[in-house]
Image (cartoon, rainbow, N blue to C red):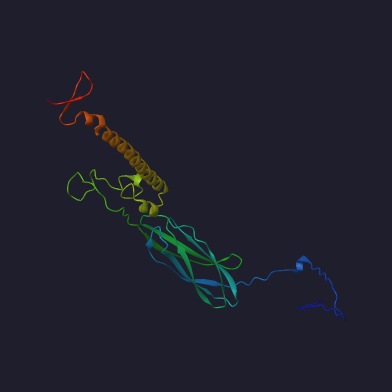
């Protein structure tokens, strides 16, 4: 049981159930971690629009050591970039690889930002760092057609009383109150409920108005319809005798 490759052998002439218990001292157990030196060759970030998934950080790494090892890659960016999750890579001696990190900007405005890439070995020691700067492009805001006349000088200024989606925040950036498709795109769920309730109220109001209108027309028709007794009393050639209570022919 001693030496660099200890082994144990037990021979038996028949099949049988057996248990083997091995005891090792804790100080005899250890984990082998291979450490190697790595380097960041370059870091590239292209400009992209805010609130989009087009941002991408691309970095090229190399294991400059002589053993296969694990490396950790971390990315730290300034505002308005969201936190970026790190990655682990395994590289053979002198192997190169490219790692991609998606970037997301939590802003609609144009801003400058910087991201730093940190390369660490298997036990967390920093081996190399590199950074790159880039710009977040402002997002163009388009709220659709705007209606209404503008009161003011015709010099391109935005002074006036025109009705627009920008001047009415209750429309959630949409052109009018019933822009349900626009509400869906902007995630304005309360506006969708208000629009549905308004449509239901309009339908109920129309039904009630129709009921009262039909009732009024029916009463009007019954009022103007001549009675049978009146028709008989107004027969041609006869008049009503007020003293005897019957019709008397004209003489």
Q: Residue furthest bottom?
A: 13
Q: Which residue lies furthest to the right in this view?
A: 13
Q: Indicate the quadrant containing the N terminus: top left, top right, bottom left or bottom right.
A: bottom right
Query: How many marks on residues?
Result: 0
Q: In this view, does 176 lie above or below 111?
A: above
Viewer-side residue, 142 vs 233 = 233
Q: Position of residue 129 (x, y in %)?
A: 50, 66
Q: Where is residue 60 in the image (x, y as percent from the top left)?
A: 48, 72
Viewer-side residue, 45 vs 249 = 249
Q: Residue at x 29, y 36 (%)?
A: 218
Whether residue 171 is visible to the viewer of this picture, yes or no, is yes
Q: Residue at x 39, y 48 (%)?
A: 192
Q: Which residue is drawn at 44% across and 60% down?
A: 104
Q: Is residue 134 above or below residue 68?
A: above
User: In the drawing, does residue 99 fall left or right of residue 198?
Assistant: right
Q: Indicate the quadrant containing the C terminus: top left, top right, bottom left or bottom right.
A: top left
Q: In which quarter of the image is residue 79?
A: bottom left
Whether residue 227 is visible to the viewer of this picture, yes or no, is no
Q: Which residue lies furthest to the left in this view?
A: 251
Q: In which quarter of the image is residue 222?
A: top left
Q: Where is residue 133 in the image (x, y as percent from the top left)?
A: 41, 63
Viewer-side residue, 119 vs 177 = 177
Q: In this view, does 56 lie above or below 194?
A: below
């Amino acid at each position: 049981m001693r030496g660099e490759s200890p082994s144990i052998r037990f021979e038996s002439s028949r099949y049988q159930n057996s248990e083997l218990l091995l005891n090792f001292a804790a100080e005899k157990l250890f984990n082998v971690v291979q450490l190697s030196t790595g380097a960041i060759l370059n870091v590239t970030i292209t400009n992209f629009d805010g609130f989009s998934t087009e941002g991408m950080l691309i970095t090229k790494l190399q294991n400059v050591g002589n053993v296969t090892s694990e490396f950790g890659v971390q990315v730290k960016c300034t505002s308005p970039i969201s936190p970026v999750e790190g990655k682990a890579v395994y590289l053979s001696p002198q192997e190169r690889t490219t790692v991609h990190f998606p970037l997301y900007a939590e802003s609609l405005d144009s801003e400058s930002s910087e991201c730093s890439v940190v390369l660490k070995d298997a036990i967390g020691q920093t081996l190399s760092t590199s950074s790159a700067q880039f710009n977040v492009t402002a997002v163009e805001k388009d709220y659709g057609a705007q209606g209404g006349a503008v009161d003011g000088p015709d010099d391109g200024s935005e002074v006036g009383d025109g009705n627009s989606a920008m001047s009415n925040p209750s429309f959630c950036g949409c052109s009018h109150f019933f822009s349900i498709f626009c509400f869906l795109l902007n995630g304005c769920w309360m506006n969708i409920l208000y629009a549905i309730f308004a449509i239901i109220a309009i339908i109920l109001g129309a039904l009630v108005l129709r009921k009262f209108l039909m009732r009024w027309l029916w009463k009007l028709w019954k009022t103007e319809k001549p009675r049978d007794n009146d028709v008989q009393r107004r027969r041609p050639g006869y008049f009503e005798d007020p003293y005897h209570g019957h019709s008397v022919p004209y003489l």
